[in-house]
Amino acid sequence: MKFLFDQNLSHKLVERLKEFYPNSSHVIYHNLSKSDDFEVREFAKNKGFTIVTQDSDFYDIAIIRGVPPKVIWIKSGNSSTSHIEYLLLKNKVTIQKFEEDNKSICLELI
């Protein structure tokens, strides 16, 4: 599993979660922080990333265009980086099952 964290999430998550989600990255490391959602999505698709976001836009696009890439939608509101980290660690088994399920498009974490 490798994640591409959207601009609405901290780049610090890459380092903090590298033991559990190696090869993950953040849009800022690929000069995508000012790119539109379609460009970010295309990059994630081409590089084999799952997009992690707090934004519903990637879900909406995935419903229309399908997968890849899959989307993990953090729906916990304005949460701290520590809380996002906690959610991704607490749901590691669920995330792994989501990644393995070819029919799944989006995983919502609250």
Image (tube, rainbow, N blue to C red):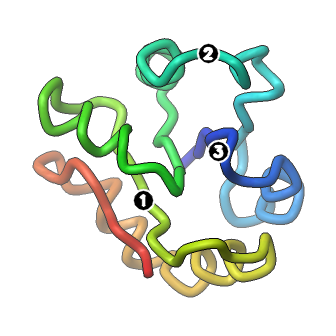
At which x and y percent is residue 103? Answer: 11, 49
SS for tag 3? Answer: strand
Say if mark 3 contacts mark 1, CB within 8 Å.
no
Mark 3 or 2 closer to N-term? 3
In the shown orientation, is residue 74 left or right of residue 24? left
Given the image, on which type of amino acid does mark 2 rest? Answer: Ser
Residue 85: name its quadrant: bottom right
Badge number at residue 35: 2
At which x and y percent is residue 26? Answer: 73, 37
SS for tag 2? Answer: loop
Residue 86: name its quadrant: bottom right
Say if mark 2 contacts mark 1, CB within 8 Å.
no
At which x and y percent is residue 3? Answer: 59, 45
Given the image, on which type of amino acid does mark 3 rest? Answer: Phe
Badge number at residue 73: 1
In front here: 58 or 17?
Answer: 58
Badge number at residue 5: 3
Q: Could you tell me which residue is drawn at 51 percent across and 34 percent down? A: 49
